[in-house]
């Protein structure tokens, strides 16, 4: 695969000892900002969200979605061809990474992914404007089957990976400081309670909304909703379709069984 984007990601993965690996809309950006503020406080350095860039004495961390990190940056026919193969493209590079596998309830991902795609002005491509979430779920390019296949592939990779690794869910991150402690110790070998408290204060939902304001610098803007249980707003028939989607129950069982 001879694309500049591919080569840039490959080089990044080769240079970063740690990788946060997820499907989009699983809490990756929240994790990135919290870790960034933890580093700011613990190492007494300026805040940065570019955690893959080398800094003396600070572990470099890549945040990637495998081939989905190339979305909009390689020709669309090539991207969808890779997606149809249902396989990861950077497995060779992952052999050198300590990996944090990050998951989220697949239906919540679906509801978050839909408006997110609408917000991105992709070059030379406009995703279909799905009026209803149920239509989006059926999309062969973006829908629920894509999410299920990707997360199952992540779980397969985790089971075969013999490197240092942990698995975390977005739901754990929301309710339990212990999972953050485990994550921080996984990367930094120690836990600085004061730095963590500072990082939590900087990444409350209210502050993240403020940072997403048009009045703040581009480097600290990002799109984050963080909601859940949107399915309850649908009709009973639509709820039934989504909750009984082929493969969904089995995926949720695998995720729950593998929670750290």
Image: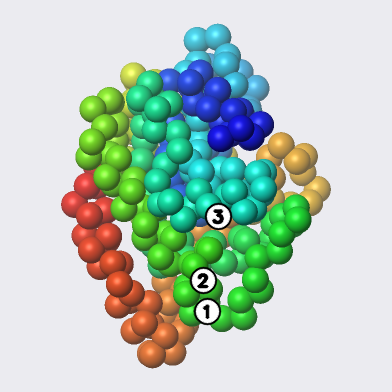
Q: Quadrant of residue 55?
A: top right
Q: Is residue 165 left or right of residue 46?
A: left
Within-10-Å neighbours for mark 2: few <14, some 14–19, many 20+: some
Q: Is residue 138 above or below residue 220?
A: below
Q: Secondary structure beneath disc 3? A: helix
Label 3–label 1 contact, CB within 8 A: no
Please give the residue where the numbered disc 2 appears in the rendered image.
139
Front tag of 3 and 1: 3
Q: CA distance from mark 3 to mark 1?
A: 19 Å
**Foreground disc of the pair 2, 3:** 3
Q: Which residue is mark 1?
A: 135
Give the residue displayed 28% in from the left and 26% down from the top: 164
- Location of the N terminus by quadrant is top right
User: Is 108 displayed left or right of 254 in the figure?
Assistant: right
Q: Viewer-proximal residue, 111 or 187?
A: 111
For residue 171, which numbered disc appears in the image?
none
User: In terms of secondary structure, where does tag 1 sit?
Assistant: helix
C-beta proximity under 8 Å, tags 2 and 1: yes
Query: Between 151 and 50, which is closer to the camera in this rendering?
Result: 151
Residue depicted at 36% across the width and 82% down the height: 241
Q: Residue 172 appears at what percent x and percent y? A: 33, 50
Camera sees residue 113: yes
Disc sitting over residue 80 in the figure:
3
- How are the residues colored? rainbow
Residue 217, position as x, y percentages in the image: 77, 39
Residue positioned 33% across, 48% down in the render: 153
- Residue 75 in picture, x, y percent from top left: 67, 48
C-alpha gap between disc 2 and disc 1: 7 Å
Report x, y in % for residue 36.
55, 30
Choose the circle earlier in sequence order: 3 or 1. Answer: 3
């Amino acid at each position: 695969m001879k694309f500049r984007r591919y080569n840039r990601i490959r080089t990044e993965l080769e240079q970063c000892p740690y990788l946060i690996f997820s499907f989009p809309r699983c809490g990756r950006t929240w994790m990135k900002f919290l870790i960034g503020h933890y580093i700011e406080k613990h190492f007494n350095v300026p805040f940065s969200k570019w955690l893959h860039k080398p800094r003396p004495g600070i572990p470099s961390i890549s945040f990637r979605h495998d081939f989905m990190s190339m979305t909009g940056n390689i020709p669309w026919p090539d991207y969808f061809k890779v997606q149809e193969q249902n396989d990861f493209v950077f497995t060779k590079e992952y052999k050198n990474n300590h990996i944090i596998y990050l998951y989220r309830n697949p239906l919540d991902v679906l509801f978050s992914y839909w408006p997110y795609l609408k917000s991105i002005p992709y070059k030379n491509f406009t995703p279909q404007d799905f009026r209803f979430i149920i239509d989006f779920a059926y999309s062969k390019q973006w829908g629920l089957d894509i999410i299920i296949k990707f997360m199952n592939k992540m779980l397969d990779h985790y089971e075969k990976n013999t490197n240092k690794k942990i698995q975390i869910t977005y739901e754990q991150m929301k309710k339990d400081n212990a999972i953050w402690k485990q994550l921080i110790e996984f990367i930094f070998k120690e836990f600085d309670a004061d730095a963590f408290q500072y990082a939590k204060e900087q990444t409350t939902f209210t502050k993240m909304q403020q940072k997403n304001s048009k009045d703040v610098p581009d480097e600290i803007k990002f799109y984050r909703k963080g909601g859940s249980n949107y399915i309850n707003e649908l009709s009973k028939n639509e709820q039934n379709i989504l909750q009984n989607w082929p493969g969904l129950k089995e995926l949720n069982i695998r995720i729950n069984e593998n929670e750290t």
